[in-house]
Amino acid sequence: MAVRAVRGAVQVAADRREQVLAATTELVTALLEANALTPDDVISLLFTATPDLTSEFPALAARELGLADTPLLCATEIAKPDALPRVVRVLAHVETMRAKAEVRHVYLGGAAVLRRDIAQ
């Protein structure tokens, strides 16, 4: 079993609590499914949000998905003037049998422009 890092991002339609939670839920679910992971495979999740998202902590969505015993952390992205707005990013540390090249990173919706080379 290896420890791998899996990245992902999603653009949130508006800074409303329910939309931040829904978008983050979609992101975490897609990341787990794309890599055939269960909550027990997740070591930790680091979430970042652009400075324009303040209505809720993205980590709450992971807690509501059942990642209750998983260390979670939220932080704010650098306030770069021309950055894509309303983006939640995640860096997941997971245990998996997949080789590094087989890990599938997930970029959803408007966040796909961040990594066109690997967006789902």
Image: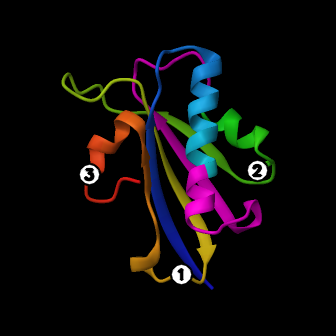
Q: Give the quarter of the figure containing the N terminus.
A: bottom right
> For the point 58% across and 22% down, which residue is it?
19
Which of the two discs, 3 and 1, labels the residue nearer the N terminus?
1
Discs 3, 2 touching: Cβ within 8 Å: no
Residue 109 quadrant: top left
Circle 1 SS class: loop
> For the point 18% across and 25% down, which residue is it?
82
Q: Give the quarter of the figure containing the C terminus.
A: bottom left
Please give the label number shown on residue 67: 2
Of badges 3 and 2, the one in the foreground is 3
Please give the label number shown on residue 50: none
> For the point 59% across and 84% down, which residue is it?
97
Which of the two discs, 3 and 2, labels the residue nearer the N terminus?
2
Q: From the viewer's perspective, is 32 left or right of 81? A: right
Which amino acid type is shown beneath numbered disc 2?
A: Leu
Which amino acid type is shown beneath numbered disc 1?
A: Arg
Query: Would you place residue 25 above or below residue 32 in this image?
Result: above
Q: Is residue 53 magenta?
A: yes
- Relative depth, front residue between 50 and 16: 16
Residue range corresponding to the magenta coloring? 30-57
Q: How many marks?
A: 3
> For the point 67% across and 62% down, which residue is it?
42
User: Gap between marks 2 and 1, in whole Å?
Assistant: 21 Å
Residue 10 appears at what percent x and percent y?
Answer: 45, 38
- Relative depth, front residue between 18 and 78: 18
Residue 60 appears at what percent x and percent y?
Answer: 70, 33
Circle 3 residue: 116
Q: From the viewer's perspective, is 27 left or right of 51? A: right
Please give the label number shown on residue 98: 1
Which of the two discs, 2 and 1, labels the residue nearer the N terminus?
2
Which amino acid type is shown beneath numbered disc 3?
A: Arg
